[in-house]
Amino acid sequence: MQFRKTVIWKDIFAILSQKVSPYKIGTWKAIVHTSKGNVEPLVINNIDIEKDYVNKVTETIILTFLLDKGTYLTSLYPCLENLEVTLYRYPHRDIPTSKIVNYDFKQKFKAIFLHEYNDRPRGTKDEMVSLAGTQLLQPVEVKLQLMNLNVEPLRLKWVTGSLLGYTQEMNLKSIIHSELNKVSLPTGKVIENVTIAKPDNSKPVKNLIIPSGTSLLDYPAWLQDDGMGVYNAGIGTFVTNTKNIQTNKLESNFYVYPTHKSVSGRPTLYLYVAPVYELGYNDKTFSIKGNTLHIVGHIHDGYIENRQGNELQNGVGFRLPSATSYMSKPVNITAAGPVASKENLNYKVATTSRCDGFNLAKRSANMTSANPYKHYSEYVKQVGNYVNFEWQQSDFTRLLPAMPVVLYRLVGNETIKEKGVLTQSTTIIQMKGKGIVDKSGYTETTILRFFVSSVLS
């Protein structure tokens, strides 16, 4: 069957045939702020952006650019301890002149000089370089790691104290909001929006003591592991600037969410898998409809099948003695003797039976636990697979943690629909032209990594 006669072609064609593309070929520029003044690179070679919503608290950005060696040795290298960078993106047709430029991305970052990748001064020959002779020197490539300015003060924020009789939602909101109100930047509030997904654990905690030395950014993870649990599918904390899908403006956000279960209310990603030959080079790869993004692309490096191996090695469930059940006296004394209910003594979790009948459900290494949410979360990560989806001409600023994902792909003549949750994105921004003169705009490609669970919908 020809692909254009399949069911999903109609949705793909609607994206490819848009009159106006939401993706506009853009040009990037950077200004490096040093104690000796501002430095503008000759050209940005590429920008690598990784957003790991499971293991990190903010994005990792590597900026690579060219700078003439004289400026590098006299203005940038001596100021390594305190560097900041402002990144700008604007449509290619609006190359700055004397008129006002409408930037569709503008953000300032803390910059970390990556010594292992950058040129180091070599003796008196480099020490004698002056700006007057820069035109005689070859440009040098510079790599900087950029950190979100909103994260820098939060890394130094510590919380402690006791909370009595609050639910976990109240525990999260009270601490995070109160601590954020104590921090500000020269430009205003350190965080504009705080979004906390509703916890699965709704029971009040009688007495919760936060140990001294707990970082604000680590506080949600402490609640999950040591504070009676929050979500049954992992927990993530992420601070980032994202584009509001309604207003199209960048906003600073503090997110707390389950890492392996999608959050209701997030914009949904509808992904359509198409053969590479149907896409070619097309700048119309996604459309925005209300609170949804519809994206056409293809599977990157095939499917990552982890579920079968995990089930055989780690089992299809777990058994964990409950520390709280003993207080409720689940053993009844009868004339025939003591009668106990296993359901009241243990947390027991399992998926549907395996076809081969080997249904391993390990006993947890913990003797007992009053926090099943930590163990639920470890288990859920084992019963699913990851998928990598390549999105060309992407817009990384529209991606949020724990976005629901719906994937449509064709297997033979059958359309397969899979639901998952976004766990990571890796974006590569590269210059289209060659050299310093030919600045033909930049291409942006994002690999969306999402988790498809066999037990959570």
Image: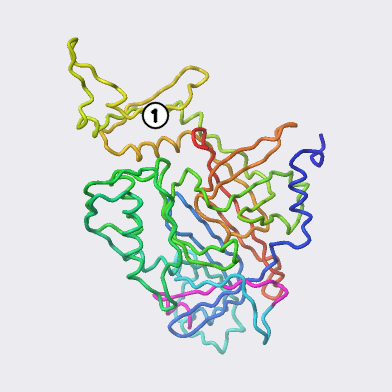
Measured as percent of width and height from the top left, residue 368 is found at 25, 32
- Residue at image position (65%, 73%) is 90
Task: Determine which quarter of the picture holds residue 64.
Answer: bottom right
Q: Mark 1 sits on what residue?
A: 349
Q: Is 84 within the magenta? A: yes
Taking 146 as reference, is 438 left or right?
right
* Residue 304, above or below 144: above
* Amino acid type of the residue tagged 1 in the rendering: Val
Query: Which residue is depicted at the point 30% across and 39% down?
Result: 371
**In this figure, what is the number of numbered marks?**
1
Question: Is residue 8 on the magenta stretch?
Answer: no
Q: Estimate the x, y position of residue 432 in percent, counting from the top left.
A: 70, 65
Q: Which residues are magenta?
A: 74-94
| Residue sitting nearer the eye, 206 or 429 | 206
Q: Where is residue 75 drawn, in percent x and y? A: 48, 82
Q: Residue furthest front?
A: 335
The correct choice, above or below, for 46 with respect to 374 in the image is: below
Q: Residues within 10 Å of mark 1 (few under 14, many from 20)?
A: some
